[in-house]
Image (tube, rainbow, N blue to C red):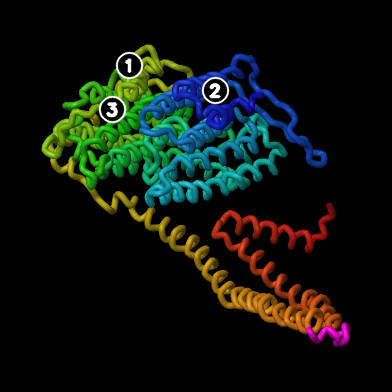
């Protein structure tokens, strides 16, 4: 029952999609609310048998602690906002969209409550597949196909490492249960390489380090889906998993995570500053904020990463939903050849939508870490966790660029009126309700009732010097923007947009190497078909034509002459002889050969479908058969 509840999201579109929109909306809300039921049962860890393999008993383990409940509430709350928002965002609802969205929510819910490595990996893959489908929702657009494929391939690299790490830890601990892993404490130093593979999946999913290049291209999907993927769900899954596994990670890995997160936070902020598209700026912002969380995981206070994940989910979901509102507004009054995401064309938005603009400012205030917002409290705690190390100054540098790109967006929406196009159109009012709700949740009370201090266990004490440093950086950033406003508003660099060659490396390795190899194999297969199979099929068709038109006509003519005609008196044995030849030599011999060739041609054609997945399955079956022959495995 506990495992089926998450997939009530997925089943809802199948059963009730044709209902009235409000009825279906109520059903989705009901499915989300029912997912809270297991947490009223009072269990901490729930185990039950899954299957037996020889003498090994595999169990399913579910976790119900405070972190699990917090994450489930977070995903469900953001999910409700996105579902309600999507009802009014799309002019015509699509069954595919609701199907993909429901699968994504169910998979993420299952990932959170699972405390068993194999079960986590299954839901991990389902999250990746559903995000791939959502990013590629507009499959008729080349950028959507490219973005979804890029996200899939780069995450698969991490997933392979994640699976190798899971199997390595299983060999060490003889169990897939996470609570048994955590009870063992730190991993043996001589087998640390296993943990490097284990964290690879989390780094890819959270777009950290070299894997960050897939996240900006994922903006090609629907904006509500972007809010779900980049706020509280897919990208946060890697941070959540690393926090669960943090007790078994060695000091070297934690040190690496701290440095990698700090560098990624800085690079993501720089990338956002050089963008002109609104969603691309928010994508760089997400990369940067995830870097903050990763840096905290490598420090002595990993719980600060979860606190920032919690606060970040609300204001980042609000930023994306507001971006969707702005893009929706722009699409109705810009010319066909103008980009609705270009911030240089949004100068009229403030005059037409001052309340939404004010809430948008509130979200960016939380992102910059201004007082009275949730981002201020978590940002100060994250800086304190670095304890004035070099990573502390890297994070301060990322604050500097964060303020610059935030002011760049806000000023473009208000002061760029020369490029504006006045229009009386206003998006539907229900579209703004989730934005207002998330704006309220971006204030300080969501993490602490004290607006200036985050007083929680396992959270570092924020000293006055930390606050002075961060506030000084904020002040310097504002002065810098004020001094170089015109330059910053027009910043755009192809080199930064390409992530310093990382995108080129991806294009060279995946697009030009792997995919071109598949196309090369396809070309070779087509060459075999053209040179060998097609001539055989043509020969078979000629034989069939000869049999039907020539030989059969000759036999019928002879029949008329010697059986029913004036030459009927000839020995009947001649007719019997031809009949025997027709039946036992021609039909049995030539026609059997003809049909065999046709069947071989048709059977071979079924193998050349152009689907990579089928080729992989054929390869795996062939390898399995070879192994069975080599080692003589008996079933």
**How many marks overall?**
3
Q: Secondary structure at mark 2?
A: helix
Residue located 57% across and 43% down the image = 198
Residue 41 in the image: above or below residue 346? above
Q: CA distance from mark 3 to mark 1?
A: 36 Å
- Which residue appears farthest toward the top when viewing the image? 449
**Range of residues picked out in magenta:** 566-574
**Residue position marked by numbered label 2 in the rendering:** 31
Residue located 57% across and 19% down the image = 34
- Near mark 2 (Cα within 10 A), the count class, few <14, some 14-19 or many ≥20, is many
Q: Which mark is residue 452?
A: 1
**Residue position marked by numbered label 3 in the rendering:** 427
Residue located 65% across and 76% down the image = 545
Examine the structure image and report whether residue 569 is included in the region drawn in magenta.
yes
* Residue 629 makes an appearance in the image: yes
Residue 444 in the image: above or below residue 630? above
**Disc number lying in front (1 or 2):** 2
Dividing the picture into quarters, in which one does residue 88 lie? top left
Q: Position of residue 183 (x, y in %)?
A: 65, 29
Q: CA distance from mark 1 to mark 2?
A: 37 Å
Q: CA distance from mark 3 to mark 2?
A: 28 Å
Q: Position of residue 65 (x, y in %)?
A: 58, 21
Say whether marks 3 and 1 touch (CB < 8 Å): no
Examine the structure image and report whether residue 583 is included in the region drawn in magenta.
no
- Residue 596 relative to residue 536: left or right: right
Q: Secondary structure at mark 1?
A: loop
Q: Position of residue 418 (x, y in %)?
A: 11, 38
Q: Between residue 49 and residue 76, name the one nearer to us.
A: 76
- Near mark 1 (Cα within 10 A), the count class, few <14, some 14-19 or many ≥20, is some
Q: Secondary structure at mark 3?
A: loop
Q: Which one is earlier in the sequence, the residue at label 3 or at label 1?
A: 3
């Amino acid at each position: 029952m506990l495992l089926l509840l998450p997939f009530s999201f997925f089943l809802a579109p199948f059963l009730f999609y044709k209902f009235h929109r409000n009825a279906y909306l109520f059903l989705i809300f009901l499915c989300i609310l029912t997912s809270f039921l297991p947490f009223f049962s009072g269990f901490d860890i729930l185990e039950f048998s899954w299957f037996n393999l020889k003498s090994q008993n595999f169990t399913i383990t579910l976790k119900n602690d405070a972190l699990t409940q917090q994450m489930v509430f977070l995903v469900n709350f953001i999910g409700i906002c996105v579902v309600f928002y999507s009802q009014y965002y799309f002019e015509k609802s699509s069954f595919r969209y609701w199907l993909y969205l429901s699968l994504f929510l169910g998979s993420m819910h299952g990932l959170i409550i699972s405390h068993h490595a194999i079960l986590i990996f299954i839901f991990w893959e389902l999250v990746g597949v559903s995000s791939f489908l959502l990013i590629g929702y507009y499959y008729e657009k080349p950028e959507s196909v490219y973005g979804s494929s890029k996200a899939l391939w780069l995450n698969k690299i991490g997933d392979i490492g994640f699976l190798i790490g899971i199997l390595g830890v299983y060999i060490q601990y003889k169990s897939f249960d996470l609570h048994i892993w955590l009870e063992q404490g730190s991993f043996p130093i001589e087998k640390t390489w296993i943990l490097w593979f284990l964290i690879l999946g989390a780094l890819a999913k959270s777009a950290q380090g070299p894997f960050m290049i897939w996240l900006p291209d994922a903006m090609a999907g629907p904006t509500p889906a972007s809010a779900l993927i980049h706020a509280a769900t897919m990208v946060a899954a890697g941070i959540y998993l690393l926090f669960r596994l943090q007790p078994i990670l060695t000091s070297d890995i934690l040190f690496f995570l701290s440095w990698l997160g700090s560098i990624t936070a800085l690079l993501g902020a720089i990338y956002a500053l050089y963008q002109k598209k609104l969603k691309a700026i928010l994508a760089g912002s997400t990369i940067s904020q995830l870097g903050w969380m990763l840096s905290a995981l490598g420090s002595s206070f990993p719980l600060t990463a979860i606190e920032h994940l919690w606060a970040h989910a609300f204001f980042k979901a609000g930023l994306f939903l507001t971006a969707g509102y702005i893009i929706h507004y722009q699409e109705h009054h810009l010319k066909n050849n103008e980009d609705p995401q270009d911030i240089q064309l949004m100068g009229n938005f403030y005059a037409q939508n001052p309340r939404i603009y004010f809430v948008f400012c509130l979200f960016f205030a939380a992102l910059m870490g201004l007082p009275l917002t949730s981002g201020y409290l978590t940002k100060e705690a994250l800086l304190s966790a670095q304890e004035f190390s070099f990573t502390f100054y890297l994070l301060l540098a990322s604050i500097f660029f964060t303020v610059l790109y935030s002011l760049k967006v806000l000023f473009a929406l208000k002061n760029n009126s020369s490029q504006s196009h006045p229009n009386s159109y206003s998006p539907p009012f229900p579209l703004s309700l989730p934005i207002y709700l998330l704006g309220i949740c971006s204030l300080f009370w969501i993490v602490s009732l004290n607006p200036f201090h985050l007083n929680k266990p396992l959270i570092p004490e924020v000293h006055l010097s930390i606050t002075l440093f961060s506030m000084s950086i904020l002040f310097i950033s504002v002065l810098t923007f004020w001094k170089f406003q015109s330059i910053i508003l027009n910043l755009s660099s192809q080199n930064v947009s390409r992530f310093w060659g990382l995108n080129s490396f991806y294009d060279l390795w995946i697009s030009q190497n792997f995919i071109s190899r598949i196309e090369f194999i396809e070309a070779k297969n087509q060459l075999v078909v053209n040179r060998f199979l097609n001539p055989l099929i043509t020969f078979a068709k000629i034989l069939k034509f000869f049999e039907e038109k020539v030989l059969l006509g000759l036999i019928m003519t002879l029949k008329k002459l010697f059986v029913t005609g004036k030459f009927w008196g000839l020995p009947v044995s001649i007719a019997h002889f031809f009949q025997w030849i027709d039946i036992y030599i021609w039909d049995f011999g030539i026609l059997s050969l003809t049909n065999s060739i046709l069947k071989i041609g048709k059977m071979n054609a079924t193998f050349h479908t152009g689907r990579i997945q089928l080729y992989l399955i054929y390869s795996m079956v062939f390898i399995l058969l070879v192994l069975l022959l080599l080692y003589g495995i008996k079933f």
